[in-house]
Image: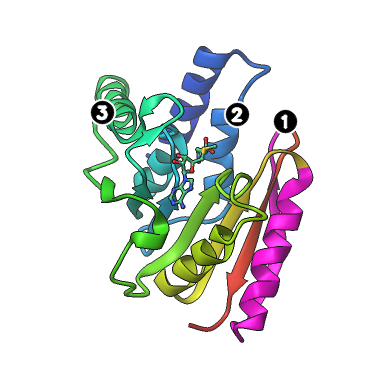
Amino acid sequence: MLNKVISFQMRKAEDWFGPDIVLQADEAVLIDSLGINGNHYILFVGAGNNHMPLVSCAIRGAKVDVVQPEFGYFGSQTGQLEHWIENEKKMMIVSLGEDLIKGRINVRKHVGTIETFKPNLKLYSHVFLLNVLDSNEGSDNFYQICDSVFSHLKPNSQIIVSAISDYAINIAEKISNYAKKLKIDNRMERVFIFKDLHSVYSINIRMG
Ligand SMILES: C[S@@+](CC[C@H](N)C(=O)[O-])C[C@H]1O[C@@H](n2cnc3c(N)ncnc32)[C@H](O)[C@@H]1O
């Protein structure tokens, strides 16, 4: 069934964007390559209105929470996320006869910044920061965001970071070095390259 869903996502992404611009399909491949499954509990910080990676995690059985401010560049981003996830659910029911998201995505876990998301219960196996830290790099917020992210991670977890162009390496190194400074053992690696060449890094946190 999962293979059926993955090819469904790829086909749909191509229908929407054409075969040359397959960013959404790439995101489904990224999630697949990370081995996300039903044992994982995932936090998306700043998902924007981009539902695809969330849906990709949920159909693999993972539980997904979103933390972000209500409003983004294009109005209510949480509202738009809910709309697109509902849309995806309907398309799955029509195409596959089943809703595989099964209510596993909570787009309103905390409507606000990650710095204000409490309590810090160390629940999450993965925290995604896809194109979120570009605008915070260089500000004090950067380290406050890192502190908060660390406090939500369970032992042996992963922070997944992307940024436009190869800038992601600077951001990932900065997170990794800051974690080391706080004596959080970690290893950084490049895990994925999108077709538009922006890279994704993982900071693998070894201890809680
Ligand atoms: C450029 S958008 C990226 C959206 C999406 N992740 C993507 O890759 O298409 C940046 C997102 O980060 C969110 N954001 C920025 N600072 C944040 C913070 N401190 N805590 C939570 N979300 C934040 C914004 O509201 C926005 O949704």
- Horizontal side of 17 relative to 194 (left or right) equals left
> Dot 1, how many residues are within 10 Å of its Cα: few (below 14), some (14-19), or many (20+)?
few
Which amino acid lies under the numbered mark 2 shown in the image of this protein? Leu
Looking at the image, do the residues carrying marks 2 and 1 touch, with CB atoms under 8 Å apart?
yes
Q: Quadrant of residue 52?
A: top left
Q: Residue furthest front?
A: 140
Instruction: Give the percent coordinates (x, y) of residue 158.
Output: 54, 65
Residue at position x 60%, y 70% from top? 204
Image location (x, y in percent) of residue 50: 45, 33
In the picture, the disc for residue 196 is 1
Q: Earlier in the sequence, mark 1 or mark 3?
A: 3
Q: Which residues are magenta?
A: 166-195
- The N terminus lies in quadrant: top left
Tag 2: Cα neighbours inside 10 Å, few (<14), some, or many (≥20)? some
Secondary element at tag 3? helix
Residue 189 within the segment the image draws in magenta? yes
Give the quarter of the image for residue 93. top left
Q: Which residue is mark 3?
A: 86
Q: Which mark is residue 23?
A: 2
Taking 139 as reference, is 120 left or right? left
Residue 179 appears in view:
yes
Among numbered discs 2 and 1, the one appearing first in the sequence: 2
